[in-house]
Image (tube, rainbow, N blue to C red):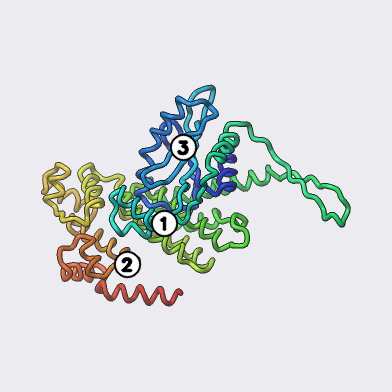
């Protein structure tokens, strides 16, 4: 497995493409990515794994499977085999084979029945991807050769200037030392993600320092870009850890998208460092405040339904009917376990989403109130002030002042 992981890093660094290793039950063993994928794309990708596995099981060992999904994202997959048994697969991607234009994105949105507010997130995501056309077949061939054949340790040979003595120095790479550093970094990463999964903010913050490293060499001449890529990757890993901690995907998507935009808009290393701590704090808070693990079946079902439909016209009775429980029983269990009534929880979810949309700055206060599920502007303003202690307009003004001060 160590050799496979090393090969995956080679592919990632050589071609700047995300790479994922899955076992034969589709459990993720390794995921290396610099991108910040919208949740809708992650959910779509899950559907392709079975198709890839079916194709690879029937194929020759030296084959790779090429696949393009409804978002026009392409992937290549190579089987992992041991003693002629299928043990899983390596999935390389996503990458593009077409030029991204406004028409390209609008067609993707239409094909996948997405609303207009997906335009900017998709545009940002597509810009982060590499376009391999027309070389993807050649790269697929190289990837098969890297993954299928035994790894050979290389040596770096340097030659001196022709004006000086003409001889070559052979400098073997210090693989043992590098391997130990990689091992320690992975152990620190595992510890950090564990603390996020259980919502332990204090220890997660301490673990950040152990996990830190200098990756500026990945983007020569542009250390800020290298740090942004690393912070994007951290955002993805933290989101996955919080998901394992029981946080519902819809809520995680809001956090992830918010930080993706902030990371891309950062102009200094100090900003990115601050964002790293802020992300850890917020994902830990999400585990502590919004995780659904440990709840009774009725409350778990109610939370799942509310988190997916809070922007619709829902109430205690409609939720009880939808999940198949008596409304009185639901109300009592929910209040005992959440220390909030069902309606209070719905309102807080709506205000959290409204705050996210306000910070994005793409919609008016009136539009946001309707988008998050309030039937009237006045009621939205009342609930917002009750929960946040200020009106939505005041919050928007304070947020703009804060952004201006950080500019």
Q: Earlier in the sequence, mark 3 or mark 1?
A: 3
Relative to 266, does residue 208 appear above or below in the rendering?
A: above
How far separated are the C-alphas under marks 3 and 1?
23 Å
Q: Secondary structure at mark 3?
A: strand
The residue that mark 3 highlights is 66
- Which residue is drawn at the image coordinates 38% and 55% (left, top)? 122
Say few, some or many: other residues with alpha carbon within 10 Å of mark 3 (under 14 / 14 to 19 / 20 or more).
some
Q: Quadrant of the N terminus?
A: top right
How far separated are the C-alphas under marks 2 and 1?
21 Å
Q: Position of residue 387 (x, y in %)?
A: 24, 67
Camera-side residue of 121 and 313? 121
Say few, some or many: other residues with alpha carbon within 10 Å of mark 1 (under 14 / 14 to 19 / 20 or more).
few
- Which residue is drawn at the image coordinates 45% and 26% (left, top)? 57
Camera-side residue of 308 and 290? 308
Pick out the residue farthest to the top. 84
The residue that mark 2 highlights is 362
Q: Which mark is residue 11?
A: none
Q: Earlier in the sequence, mark 2 or mark 1?
A: 1
Q: Which mark is residue 101?
A: 1
For the question of whether residue 256 can be seen, the reply is no
Q: Quadrant of residue 4?
A: top right
- Which residue is drawn at the image coordinates 38% and 33% (left, top)? 50
How far separated are the C-alphas under marks 3 and 2?
37 Å
Q: Secondary structure at mark 2?
A: loop
Closer to the camera: disc 3 or disc 2?
Answer: 3
Q: Is residue 297 left or right of residue 136?
A: left
- Which residue is drawn at the image coordinates 56% and 56% (left, top)? 212
> How many numbered marks, from 0 up?
3
Q: Secondary structure at mark 1?
A: loop
Q: Position of residue 165 (x, y in %)?
A: 88, 53
Closer to the camera: disc 3 or disc 1?
Answer: 1
Say few, some or many: other residues with alpha carbon within 10 Å of mark 2 (under 14 / 14 to 19 / 20 or more).
few
């Amino acid at each position: 497995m160590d050799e496979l992981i090393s090969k995956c890093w080679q592919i990632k660094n050589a071609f700047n493409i995300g790479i994922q290793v899955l076992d034969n039950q589709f459990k993720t063993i390794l995921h290396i990515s610099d991108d910040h994928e919208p949740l809708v794309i992650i959910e779509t990708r899950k559907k392709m794994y079975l198709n890839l596995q079916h194709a690879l099981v029937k194929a020759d060992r030296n084959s790779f499977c090429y696949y393009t999904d409804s978002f026009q994202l392409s992937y290549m997959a190579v089987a992992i085999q041991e003693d002629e048994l299928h043990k899983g697969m390596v999935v390389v991607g996503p990458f593009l084979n077409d030029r991204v234009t406004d028409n390209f994105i609008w067609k993707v949105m239409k094909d996948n029945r997405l609303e207009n507010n997906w335009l900017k997130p998709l545009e940002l995501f597509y810009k982060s991807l590499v376009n391999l056309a027309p070389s993807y077949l050649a790269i697929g061939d190289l990837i098969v050769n890297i993954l299928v054949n035994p790894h050979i340790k290389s040596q770096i040979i340097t030659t001196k200037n022709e004006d000086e003595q003409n001889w070559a120095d052979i400098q073997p790479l210090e693989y043992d030392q590098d391997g130990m550093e990689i091992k320690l970094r992975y152990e620190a990463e595992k510890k950090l993600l564990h603390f996020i999964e259980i919502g332990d903010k204090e220890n997660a913050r301490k673990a950040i320092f152990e996990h830190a490293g200098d990756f500026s060499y990945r983007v020569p001449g542009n250390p800020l870009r290298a740090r942004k890529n690393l912070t994007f990757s951290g955002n993805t890993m933290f989101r996955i850890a919080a998901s394992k901690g029981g946080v519902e995907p819809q809520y995680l998507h809001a956090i992830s998208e918010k930080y993706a935009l902030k990371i891309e808009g950062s102009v200094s290393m100090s900003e990115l460092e601050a964002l790293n701590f802020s992300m850890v704090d917020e994902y830990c808070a999400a585990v502590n405040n919004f995780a659904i693990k440990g709840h009774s079946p009725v409350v778990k079902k109610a939370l799942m339904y509310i988190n997916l439909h809070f922007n619709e016209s829902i109430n205690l009775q409609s939720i009880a009917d939808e999940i198949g429980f008596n409304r009185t029983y639901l109300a009592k269990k929910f209040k005992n376990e959440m220390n909030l009534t069902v309606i209070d929880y719905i309102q807080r979810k709506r205000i959290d989403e409204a705050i996210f949309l306000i910070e994005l700055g793409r919609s008016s206060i009136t539009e946001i109130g309707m988008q998050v599920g309030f039937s009237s502007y006045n009621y939205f303003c009342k609930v917002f002030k009750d929960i946040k202690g200020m009106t939505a307009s005041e919050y928007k003004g304070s947020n703009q002042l804060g952004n201006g001060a950080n500019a």
